[in-house]
Image: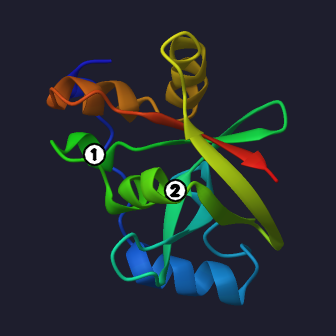
Amino acid sequence: MTESDFQLPDRTLLGAEHVRRYRETDGEVGYLWNTVPILLLTTTGRRTGEARTTPLIFGRDGDDYLVIASTGGSPRHPAWYLNLTANPRAEIQVRANHIVVTTRTATEEEKPWLWRIMADIWPNYNVYQRRTERVIPVVVLTPA
């Protein structure tokens, strides 16, 4: 996939509004976004200690959930990823299911396989990686 193949996503449901609608409908609204599955990731703010929730595209590898810390190819890691590096315990919501997870960044050995899983779901991840010099992490969320 090249930059010219980049698919501009529908941005009618984003951020706090996405979180609100997902929560109040148990994912009936917001679970599918641009035809891909979304989970809600709730981390603990590394500075504030407050709960922070982010809607993210996800995939699966066995029992594990996978997310990509891409921020569209931004030069900086997303805040939710930095929060997880400070406190790897988090909660996800997948539709109506709330699951406590422990998180980790995929190892160099497992990343190519996990990246492929996620790029098959959202091919734009390949474009995002080309946009930045930062190595975009794959995050593994394991139910606790």
Whole-percent x, y for residue 8 in the image: 30, 47
Residue 73 quadrant:
top left
Residue 133 quadrant:
top left
Q: Residue at x 33, y 39 (%)?
A: 7
Whole-percent x, y for residue 110 in the image: 59, 15
Kind of element beneath mark 1: helix
**Which amino acid, by three-letter code, is at mark 1?**
Gly
Residue 72 quadrant:
top left
The residue that mark 2 highlights is 56
For the residue carrying disc 1, how many other residues have a C-alpha within 10 Å: few (<14), some (14-19), or many (20+)?
A: some
Whole-percent x, y for residue 33 in the image: 54, 59
**Which amino acid, by three-letter code, is at mark 2?**
Leu
Tell me whether circle 2 and circle 1 mark residues in contact (CB < 8 Å): no
Q: Is residue 121 left or right of residue 99?
A: left
The residue that mark 1 highlights is 72
N-terminal label among 2 and 1: 2
